[in-house]
Amino acid sequence: MLKRILSPLLFLFFAWFIVSNENAKTIIAGIAIFLIGMHYMENGFKLFSGGVLETILQKFTRTTPRAIATGFAATAVVQSSSLVSVIIISFLSAELMGLTSAVGVVFGSNIGTTTTAWLVSSLGLKIKIAQYALPMLIFGVIMQFSRLNSYKGLGSVLIGLGFIFLGISYMKEGFETLKDGLHLAEYAMSGYSGVFVYIFFGAVATVIIQSSSATMAIIITALATGQIDYINALSLAIGANIGTTVTAILGSLASNKNGKRLAVAHIIFNLITGIVAIIFIYQLKNLVDDLAPFLAISDDDFAMKLALFHTIFNVIGVLLVAPFIRYLVSFLKTLFCTKSLGRGQPKYLTQEVMEIPASALEAIRKETVHLYDKSLETIVHAMNLHRKEIFSDKEIHEVVKQSTQPFNIDINTVYQQEIKNLYSEILHYSSRSQSYMDEEGNNQVYELKLTARNVIEMVKDIRELQRNLNYFTKSNNWFMIHEYNKLREELVTIFRRIEEIRSSSINAAEIMTQFEVLKEKSSDNEISMHHNIDTLIRENKIDSKMASSLINDVGFTHSISRKLLKTASVLWVKDQMIKELGDDYEY
């Protein structure tokens, strides 16, 4: 009840404050416009990059130095550490990236965020930036009407830059006008007491605004207009970095375990960096003064010096923490360890992955592999076999011959409670993720959905086969036992060969060649089985009922074989051109 009353009162007070204070209105409007610009830039780069950013983050992060460099470059270009974090979390969830690489990217991203300070202090304050904002907004809006996502994305980037420039202009104008009535620099505080007070203000501002880049823009603009003292501005910058730890905590609350682990890494990095910057703030200030002439920064250009300070203490933080990244990752892996999933529950289909096409595709593929593995276990048990034995070095004939005892498995129950549920989750998630994909991505998702359907149809086929298998292997008719053992041998041969191909490093063309050989062999086996059945009938070794059951089960076996090979070609052939060539054949 108190919250319901307090929230409207605070809002009304804030509205009155803005309306009654012209300078505050201009500054706050500038902050709002700046934040809108950041939002447009983030969304614009999502569309404009067309997956290029995701590809770069995936391919160029194999080592810690490369991960840090890539994190810096990506964040510096897109001006959004949150966008980079979203992609990294999605890659972690889809197992496209290891935790070590992800932490490295986060560290580099912290350095990348300092480019905002350089942008504001150089372009934003030294030229009449507002005159460039309006053309950007005009052309950005025009591009929004394009049908191509790349043009729409570029348009959003231009709109974002236009709003950022406009926001900086408004903030600068507001602080300059504010000097006529209120000079905040008069309240400057010296010594470490002032350092801690302004660090607190910087952290609080970042928590409220939820953007360290926006906080830095405010600090630099206020410093350039003489509203705050230089040393207090340095303290505010440290506070802005520390304030992002709260932002990271809030952002991770609704995230999965990977998001929470990255948030912890972010917090540890910022706290260590903040502590070092606080202890050595005066020494770092002197270092900036010494380096400034080499970067053509004048003695009285405090805005540029602040940007340099911001970059230096973040770089120092990376240099301090990066050597211990292996130990940090080991610690992070002990956090947020969830209990094993219930049977039939998806492992990879998370919300964080859905909005990033590359990650969503990989998550759906891996979940389909998960469905295949669960279905494989069911099929093997329905044939009264053990996975351990069929994937061993033992002769297939011996494995089948020795496996005569029926397994106590109810396929209907397993199908309804586990396999069907997982299949439904894949279909639901795939349909939702397709709204974020282009035509090529949609085609790949459709192919994976068909593959998932093939997998569950194999379970339905083995359900029909199991009934007769258990009945006739208990009979006294040696010929029926022999024929059903041959059916089992055919499936075990394909299972074993697929597993070998799955775990090998042979190229896509060789895989498709081997699948084609298996397909031909399966077709030959079906023909041979029908000839054998005809012979057994003529020689009165089996009756007509036995023959009809056996003929049906030969059909089920061959159906499973075709679906197995088609499923394997989709899940484990990486080369799309080779895969499409294989589609010319009817499995």
Image: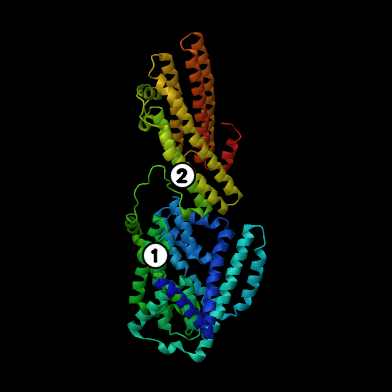
Local packing at callout 1 (Cα closer than 10 Å; few below 14, some 14-19, many 20+) is: some
Vertical placement of residue 130 versus 97, above or below: below
Q: Residue tagged by mark 1?
A: 249
> What number is the disc on residue 168?
none
Q: Name the image quarter holding residue 520.
A: top right
User: What amino acid is at disc 2?
Assistant: Glu
Give the x, y percent position of residue 240. 42, 74
Q: Nearer the viewer, residue 585 or 453?
A: 453
Q: Earlier in the sequence, mark 2 or mark 1?
A: 1
Determine the secondary structure under disc 2: helix
Residue sitting at x 38%, y 27% = 384
Q: Say whether residue 335 is visible.
A: yes
Disc 2: CA contacts within 10 A as few (<14), some (14-19) or many (>=20): many
Quarter that holds the N terminus = bottom left
Task: Identify residue for label 2.
Answer: 367
Residue at 34% in and 53% down? 337
Q: CA distance from mark 2 to mark 1?
A: 29 Å
Lateral position of residue 6 relative to residue 170, left or right? left
Q: Position of residue 558 (x, y in %)?
A: 51, 26
